[in-house]
Image: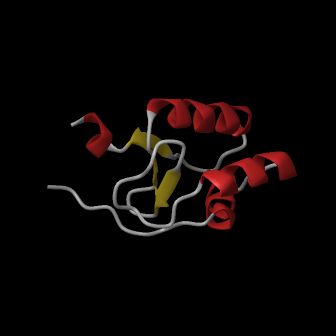
């Protein structure tokens, strides 16, 4: 059994990766953020601190997050993982 801890805000993600999203990206990401980690809904994401993992409610959301993060890849200080909530695939 594994555990994940934390509820990172968009500001905390930017700080940890040392990047700055555009206002449009920030608005989109904030609208997709889910505070409660239990059962991430499709179209939503939740970011854990330990491990540094952004969990999405469905594959489409994971792809959208990856698309937003990709241009910042060379600027990022550290790594972030993107996953999909397993409960929607049971």
Asked if residue 76 lies left or right of residue 51, the reply is right
Task: Answer with the quarter of the image where residue 4 lies.
Answer: bottom left
Asked whether residue 20 is in view, the answer is: no
Q: Residue at x 66, y 39 (%)?
A: 69
- Above-or-below relation of 4 to 42: below
Residue 58 is situated, as x and y percent measured from the top left of the image, at 44, 36
Residue 2 sits above or below residue 64 on the image: below
User: Quarter holding the C terminus?
Assistant: top left
Q: What residue appears at the point 60 percent right and 39 percent down from the top-left corner? A: 65
Q: Quadrant of the N terminus?
A: bottom left
Residue 8 to residue 40: above or below? below
Residue closest to the eye, 19 or 86: 86
The front one of 88 and 72 is 88
Give x and y (percent) for residue 48: 44, 61
- Colour mapping used in the image: secondary structure
Residue drawn where x is 39% and y is 40% of the image:
84
Residue 89 in sight in this render: yes
Left or right: where 7 falls relative to 27: left
Question: In the picture provided, is 45 more to the left or to the right than 85?
Answer: right
Residue at the outermost left position: 1
Residue 87: x percent and y percent? 27, 45
User: Along the horizontal axis of the image, is 41 left or right of 14?
Assistant: left
Q: Residue furthest bottom?
A: 6
User: What is the x, y in percent for residue 89?
Assistant: 27, 34
Q: How many marks?
A: 0
């Amino acid at each position: 059994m594994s555990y994940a801890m934390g509820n990172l805000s968009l500001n905390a993600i930017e700080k940890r990766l040392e990047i700055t999203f555009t206002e449009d990206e920030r608005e989109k990401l904030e609208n997709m953020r889910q505070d409660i980690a239990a059962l991430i809904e499709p179209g939503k994401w939740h970011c854990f601190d330990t491990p540094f993992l952004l969990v999405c409610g469905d594959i489409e959301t994971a792809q959208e997050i990856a698309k937003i993060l990709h241009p910042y890849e060379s600027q990022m200080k550290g790594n972030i993982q993107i996953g999909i909530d397993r409960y929607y695939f049971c």
